[in-house]
Every structure is written in structure tokens, then in C-alpha cells.
């Protein structure tokens, strides 16, 4: 304990302060000294001690007042205190303990007693910290287990739903249960849409694995605005035909950017998909594209939904974060779309942010232009 512990000694009697500091240093502790309460406050803000040995009667703030000041500050509230005082009455001890003392030693004292009490307090504090650490570990373990169960439940739902909507049309086709060609075409489109949804889920899992392993693709390829951005967004909106959404694409008809094509398009589709999910029926989703220097781009996606409170605007970028979970979920998805979008853009030196807007949610993705030392492949 003595090898790593720092003790702050506070006393307005210079001879006692120097003598006590010398003894404690010889015992192997690190020592900081202060001549009064104000001096102690300045020292504590620089070096947080493991223990304070403080006189009680000294210029303001006195020992009790100093303890109250430190107890009101979360950074210092847990520092243990041993009061040193010439007052030896039982009532004096009670007052000291009520004022937050971990121990109370009357002057004059025996050196052996002092060190026994110092070691006892430090040991008690260490055991308490270890207990709190174990409690925190247990809480974290339970939280992680709960999160794992929620993720597995969500994954089960996200996997089974599109599989069911693929297998049923195939079964109908195998048994020739279609009443007419129009019905057959409609059922096949449902199967194809769910196959696309399943492919997106697999891509999410692959990209999250690549992110965790630091293997996210950063090789730049040509990305055509119409073919690789506008058209996939239009196709994605077909999943939400029952909502009768209005899609506004604002930007140049033709433009070319450079990014890892599959990863970049998947990231932008997640931003659009969130906008489609959270917009009400008949709502307007706007996608604004502004070309930047060296074939970079700023892409904004705005929906007509309820928006995201300021205090949650960073939280929603955490993986698997969803406002609702399990059977109460209102929207499909694993909760990794914004995580993937931010990681993909960040890997290219860009960013994804949620901005203030009058209505709904506005997300801006910045794709930086090519650097002079970057090559383009394909």
C-alpha cells in the first residue's frame, strides 16, 4: 500500500508538519504538505491524494469545513480523511465522525498507532474500491447479457421475416397457386424485395465484422451519382410503397465521386432507409447532393419524422442502439445503419452528423475529395 499511496498532510504548525511529513516519507509513502485549508485545496486540484491527514483547528477553512467542501465535489468526495486534533473528548470524536472523518486521532499520538490507523483506512478504502469495481463488473456483465439477448432477438426477427416472405412465394410457385399472371408478378416482387432485405442484413454483418477487425475497405472507385446513388435510393423506397412517400432528389443529374463503391452506397442507403422508416405516410424525404472539390460530395438526407432529441444525437450512432427493443419495436433493422455510415465515411476522412432542422431529422454525410496521393481503382 505504501509504495503507491500519496498522503496529504495539513497542519498550520510548521514543526509538526515537517516532522510528520519526514516520518511518513520514511515509511514509504509519497507526501504532499499544506499549511492550511486553502493551501490544501490548491494542492488537491493538482495531485489527488489517497488519504488526507488534517488538523481540525486552523485558519478557514478549518478541517471540518475543508471536508465539506471536498465532499461536495464528485472528483474529491471519496478521498478518506483522518483528523488530527488535541481535542480528546467523546463529543469531539462524534463531531469529527459526523463531519466525514474516516478516523480521528488525538494529539499527541504514538507513531505506531498513527501508521496502524493510516494502513487500516487505506486498506478499508482499497477493499471498498475493489467491491465497487466488482459490483460495476457484475452490472456491466448483466447489461451485456441483456444487450446480447436483445440483439439475438432482433437478429432472429430480421432473419426470419424476409426468409418467410421468400419461402412462401416459392412454395406457391411450386404448387402453382397463382390465380393470374398479375398475382404471380406481385408475389415474385415480394420475394425479390425480401431477398434484397436479407442481402442488406448480410452486408451489415460483414461490414460490422470488417469494422471490428480494422479491415474496412478504403480503396476508392468511381461512384456515379445517378447509377450508384439516385437509382438505389429510388429502389429502396419501393419497400415503403404503402406509405405513399414523396422523394425529392436535389442536385446535379450527373456527377462522379470516388469512394469504396459497395461500402459507400450501402452507407448512403442506410441514411435514406432511416428517412423512409421514420417519415409518416405521405411524408417528404429529401436527398440533397452538393459536389465538393476533387470529386468529393456533401449528401444531406432529411425526413418528415419526429426528429432526434439533441441528447440522443450521438447515442444513435452506437451499434445496436434502438429506441425500442424486442416485441415493442416499431421499425425493422439491427440498429447498425448509422454506425456503419459513420465508420465508412470516417475511414475516408469524412463524417456523418445529425443537424438542427425545423422539422424531422437532417443527416449530413461528407465524402472528402481525392487526395493527390490517392489512386482510383475501377
Image (tube, rainbow, N blue to C red):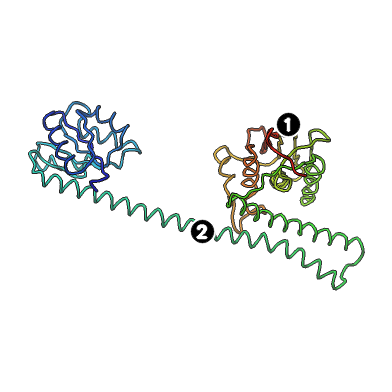
- Quarter where residue 140 is shown: bottom left
Mark 1 residue element: helix
- The foreground one among 60 and 7 is 7
Label 2 crowding class (10 Å Cα cut-off): few <14, some 14-19, many 20+? few
When the figure is inspected, residue 319 is found, relative to residue 184, above or below; the finding is above
* Residue 62 visible in rendering: yes
Name, please, the residue furthest toward the right.
181
- The foreground one among 229 and 171 is 229
Q: Residue at x 10, y 43 (%)?
A: 111
Which numbered circle lies on residue 146?
2
Q: Position of residue 34 (x, y in %)?
A: 21, 30
Which of the marked residues, 1 or 2, is nearer the chain's N terminus?
2
Q: Position of residue 271 (x, y in %)?
A: 69, 43
* Residue 362 visible in rendering: no
Figure disc tally: 2
Q: CA distance from mark 1 to mark 2?
A: 46 Å
- Quarter where residue 251 is shown: top right
Q: Residue at x 61, y 46 (%)?
A: 339
Left or right: 79 in relation to 209: left
Label 1 crowding class (10 Å Cα cut-off): few <14, some 14-19, many 20+? few
Q: Position of residue 269 (x, y in %)?
A: 72, 46
Check disc 1 and report the residue beneath it. 294
- The foreground one among 288 and 209 is 209
Left or right: 102 in relation to 129: left
Left or right: 16 in relation to 284: left
Mark 2 residue element: helix
Amino acid at each position: 500500500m505504501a509504495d503507491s499511496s500519496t498522503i496529504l498532510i495539513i497542519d498550520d504548525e510548521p514543526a509538526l508538519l515537517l516532522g510528520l511529513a519526514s516520518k511518513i516519507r520514511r515509511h514509504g509513502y509519497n507526501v504532499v504538505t499544506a499549511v492550511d485549508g486553502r493551501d490544501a485545496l490548491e494542492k488537491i486540484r493538482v495531485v489527488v491524494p489517497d488519504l488526507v491527514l488534517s488538523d481540525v483547528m486552523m485558519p478557514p477553512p478549518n478541517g471540518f469545513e475543508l471536508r465539506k467542501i471536498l465532499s461536495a465535489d464528485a472528483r474529491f468526495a471519496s478521498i478518506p480523511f483522518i483528523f488530527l486534533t488535541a481535542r480528546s473528548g467523546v463529543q469531539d470524536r462524534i463531531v469529527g465522525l459526523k463531519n466525514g472523518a474516516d478516523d480521528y486521532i488525538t494529539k499527541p499520538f504514538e507513531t505506531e498507532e498513527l501508521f496502524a490507523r493510516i494502513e487500516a483506512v487505506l486498506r478499508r478504502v482499497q477493499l471498498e474500491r475493489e467491491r465497487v469495481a466488482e459490483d460495476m463488473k457484475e452490472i456491466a456483465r448483466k447489461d451485456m447479457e441483456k444487450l446480447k439477448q436483445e440483439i439475438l432477438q432482433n437478429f432472429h426477427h430480421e432473419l426470419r421475416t424476409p426468409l418467410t416472405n421468400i419461402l412462401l412465394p416459392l412454395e406457391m410457385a411450386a404448387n402453382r397457386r397463382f390465380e393470374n399472371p398479375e398475382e404471380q408478378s406481385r408475389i415474385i416482387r415480394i420475394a425479390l424485395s425480401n431477398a434484397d432485405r436479407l442481402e442488406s442484413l448480410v452486408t451489415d454483418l460483414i461490414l460490422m465484422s470488417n469494422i471490428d477487425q480494422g479491415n474496412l475497405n478504403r480503396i476508392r472507385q468511381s461512384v456515379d451519382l445517378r447509377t450508384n446513388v439516385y437509382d438505389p435510393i429510388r429502389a429502396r423506397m419501393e419497400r415503403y410503397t404503402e406509405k405513399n412517400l414523396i422523394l425529392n432528389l436535389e442536385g446535379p443529374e450527373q456527377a462522379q465521386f470516388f469512394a469504396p463503391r459497395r461500402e459507400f452506397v450501402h452507407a448512403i442507403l442506410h441514411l435514406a432507409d432511416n428517412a423512409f422508416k421514420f417519415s409518416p405516410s405521405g411524408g417528404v424525404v429529401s436527398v440533397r447532393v452538393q459536389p465538393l472539390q476533387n470529386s468529393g460530395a456533401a449528401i444531406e438526407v432529411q425526413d418528415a419524422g419526429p426528429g432526434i432529441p439533441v441528447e440522443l444525437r450521438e447515442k444513435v450512432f452506437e451499434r445496436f442502439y434502438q429506441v425500442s427493443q424486442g416485441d415493442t419495436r416499431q421499425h425493422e433493422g439491427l440498429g447498425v445503419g448509422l454506425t456503419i455510415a459513420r465508420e465508412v465515411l470516417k475511414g475516408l476522412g469524412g463524417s456523418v452528423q445529425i443537424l438542427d432542422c425545423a422539422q424531422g431529422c437532417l443527416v449530413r454525410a461528407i465524402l472528402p475529395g481525392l487526395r493527390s496521393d490517392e489512386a482510383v481503382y475501377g
